[in-house]
């Protein structure tokens, strides 16, 4: 089974921080309040951030090996 990772659309992100609050691995940050950034090394692909995002701009995609 392929591993999934979260990806955020930086153009559409409003930096609300909702995704950051629910990430169980602290893989999401919002540096300088600009947009959410996901640390792909820490991301476990659980999808909690995508479900929590009020703008529905976080998606899960298959990670490159």
Image (tube, rainbow, N blue to C red):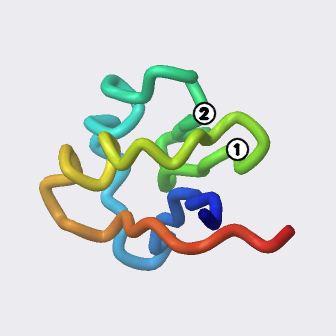
Judged from this view, the residue extending furthest toward the right is 65
Residue 60 disc label: none
| Residue 17 on image: x %, y % | 34, 36
Residue 27 disc label: 2
Above or below 1: residue 37:
above
Q: Quadrant of the C terminus?
A: bottom right
| Residue 40 on image: x %, y % | 71, 50
Q: Residue at x 42, y 29 (%)?
A: 23
| Residue 33 on image: x %, y % | 48, 42
Q: Residue at x 41, y 32 (%)?
A: 20
Helix, strand or loop at disc 2?
loop
Q: Nearer the viewer, residue 4 or 38?
A: 4
Helix, strand or loop at disc 1?
loop
Q: Residue at x 19, y 44 (%)?
A: 52
Left or right of 50? Residue 51 is left
Q: Earlier in the sequence, mark 1 or mark 2?
A: 2
Q: Are marks 1 and 2 in contact (CB under 8 Å)?
A: yes
Left or right of 8? Residue 57 is left
Residue that numbered label 1 is attached to: 39
Q: CA distance from mark 1 to mark 2?
A: 5 Å
Judged from this view, the residue extending furthest toward the front is 1
Query: Would you call the spot at circle 2 few (<14 residues within 10 Å), some (14-19), or many (20 or more)?
Result: some
Q: Residue at x 13, y 55 (%)?
A: 54
Query: Would you call the spot at circle 1 few (<14 residues within 10 Å), some (14-19), or many (20 or more)?
Result: some
Above or below 43: residue 24:
above
């Amino acid at each position: 089974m392929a591993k999934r990772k979260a990806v955020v659309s930086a153009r559409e992100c409003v930096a609300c921080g909702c995704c950051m609050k629910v990430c169980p691995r602290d893989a999401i940050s919002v540096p300088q309040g600009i947009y959410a950034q996901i640390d792909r090394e820490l991301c476990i692909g659980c999808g909690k951030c995508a479900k929590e995002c009020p703008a529905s701009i976080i998606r899960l995609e298959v990670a490159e090996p």
